[in-house]
Image: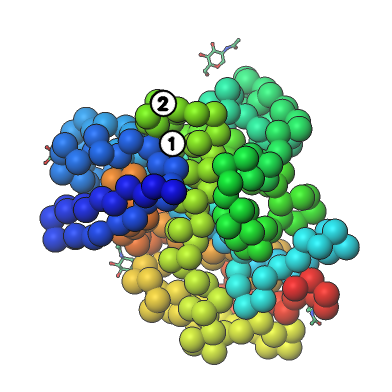
């Protein structure tokens, strides 16, 4: 497989990158200096910098999947992937931006303003990944991008259709001789690469915050651990009973998120956890 090796230089940042085998034509982006998304107001090539450029890498902490009997289990000592989301620069967001790339059998929300999101059933994105020969990617996604209450590939379809279609750098026109579903595989590679940069379980464990059904934690303690690791305050989410279940890491991407270079930023959304009494639950027996 051929990889495009690209050397990006923008201001002080300089990095040598190996892009995944399926990538858009980013060579066109070397014609002008790379800038961070949301930070350069002059017109830029939308294939090079996302127009909705506040990038969120979002993760879950679940105690069970509900599909354990089918072998859908949670990874030990790791949070799981929710997705990679393109918010507008001010923290608002759009969704289901291209119905021609709608693969979500359960659109949520089902209606946008006065438009009903079409229901599309039967597109199996795990099969699509296999058809590109990306068994490595599929194995990783099966392990770390695990849905609750639905088969994981259905959830991947939801995430792609709802969010990736709003990322301008994954538009089909950005690929040289676009082949159907290249954008899907490229998005999944990009999500996985971003997720690997935020090992939440290890961030928390480094400060003694580990799953426990008998201890509780404070919001300040949780945020301090995540701030110490990333230099910014993410959104942390809790269920109504105070059980920690989500983290959203905010950033601007240097050029396209496909390059995987993120400047960490504070959340625009605050936290939905109580100040004290946060529970970080142990997984149910048999769920890992
Ligand atoms: C903003 O983008 C324009 C067009 O690519 C470029 O000429 C300019 O240098 C960029 N400015 C900054 C501050 O990066
Ligand atoms: C649907 O909403 C859009 C944007 O709000 C508006 O421009 C359009 O006229 C509406 N269409 C109908 C059929 O109501
Ligand atoms: C994030 O918030 C902290 C605390 O309010 C502040 O000190 C810091 O400058 C903020 N960072 C950014 C990148 O805005
Ligand atoms: C921890 O508590 C949660 C919520 O009550 C429960 O679902 C889970 O099975 C418990 N885990 C263990 C190892 O007891």
From the viewer's side, name the closer residue of 151 and 88: 151
From the viewer's side, name the closer residue of 22 and 247: 22
**CB of mark 2 near ligand 1 (< 8 Å):** no
Placement of 168 over or under 196, stated as above or below:
above
Which residue occupies 44% across, 48% down? 1
Compute the Cα span from label 1 to label 2.
14 Å
Left or right side of 206 for 104: right
Q: Which mark is residue 218?
A: none
Give the residue number, with chain letter if any, for mark 1.
170
Q: Earlier in the sequence, mark 1 or mark 2?
A: 1
Q: Report x, y in % for residue 152.
A: 71, 51
**CB of mark 1 near ligand 1 (< 8 Å):** no
Left or right side of 239 for 169: left
Placement of 217 over or under 20, stated as above or below:
below
Give the residue number, with chain letter if any, for mark 2.
177
Left or right side of 25 for 188: right
SS class, disc 1: helix
Q: Report x, y in % for residue 20.
A: 42, 50
SS class, disc 2: loop
Q: Report x, y in % for residue 86.
A: 45, 43
Whether residue 159 appears in this view of the structure is no
Q: Tag 2: Cα neighbours inside 10 Å, few (<14), some, or many (≥20)?
A: few
User: What is the quadrant of residue 116 in the picture?
Assistant: top right
Query: Disc 1 vs disc 2: which is toward the camera?
Result: 2
From the viewer's side, name the closer residue of 167 and 131: 131
Count of marks overlaid on the render: 2
User: What is the quadrant of residue 63 in the picture?
Assistant: bottom right
Q: Residue furthest front?
A: 1
Q: Report x, y in % for residue 192.
A: 51, 57
């Amino acid at each position: 497989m051929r990889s495009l090796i690209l050397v990006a230089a923008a201001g002080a940042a300089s990095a040598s990158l190996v892009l995944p085998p399926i990538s858009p034509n980013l060579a066109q982006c070397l014609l002008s200096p790379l800038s961070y998304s949301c930070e350069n107001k002059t017109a830029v090539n939308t294939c090079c910098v996302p127009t909705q450029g506040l990038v969120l890498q979002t993760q879950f902490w679940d105690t069970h999947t509900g599909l354990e009997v089918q072998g859908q289990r949670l990874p030990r000592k790791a949070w799981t992937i929710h997705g990679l989301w393109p918010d507008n620069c001010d923290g608002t967001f759009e969704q289901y931006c291209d119905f021609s790339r709608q693969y979500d059998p359960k659109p949520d929300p089902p209606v946008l303003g006065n438009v009903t999101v079409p229901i599309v059933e039967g597109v199996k994105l795990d099969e699509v990944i296999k058809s590109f020969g990306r068994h490595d990617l599929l194995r990783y996604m099966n392990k770390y991008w695990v849905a609750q209450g639905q088969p994981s590939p259905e959830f991947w379809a939801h995430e792609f259709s709802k969010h990736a279609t709003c990322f301008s750098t994954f538009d089909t026109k950005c690929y040289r001789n676009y082949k159907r579903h290249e954008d899907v595989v490229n998005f999944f590679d990009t999500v996985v690469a971003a997720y690997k940069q935020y090992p939440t379980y290890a961030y928390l464990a480094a400060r003694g915050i580990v799953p426990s059904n008998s201890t509780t934690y404070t919001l300040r303690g949780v945020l301090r651990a995540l701030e110490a690791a990333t230099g910014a305050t993410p959104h942390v989410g809790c269920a109504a009973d105070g059980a920690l279940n989500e983290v959203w890491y905010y950033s601007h991407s240097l050029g396209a998120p496909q390059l995987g270079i993120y400047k960490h930023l504070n959340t625009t959304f605050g936290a939905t956890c109580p100040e004290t009494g946060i529970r970080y639950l142990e997984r149910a027996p048999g769920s890992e």
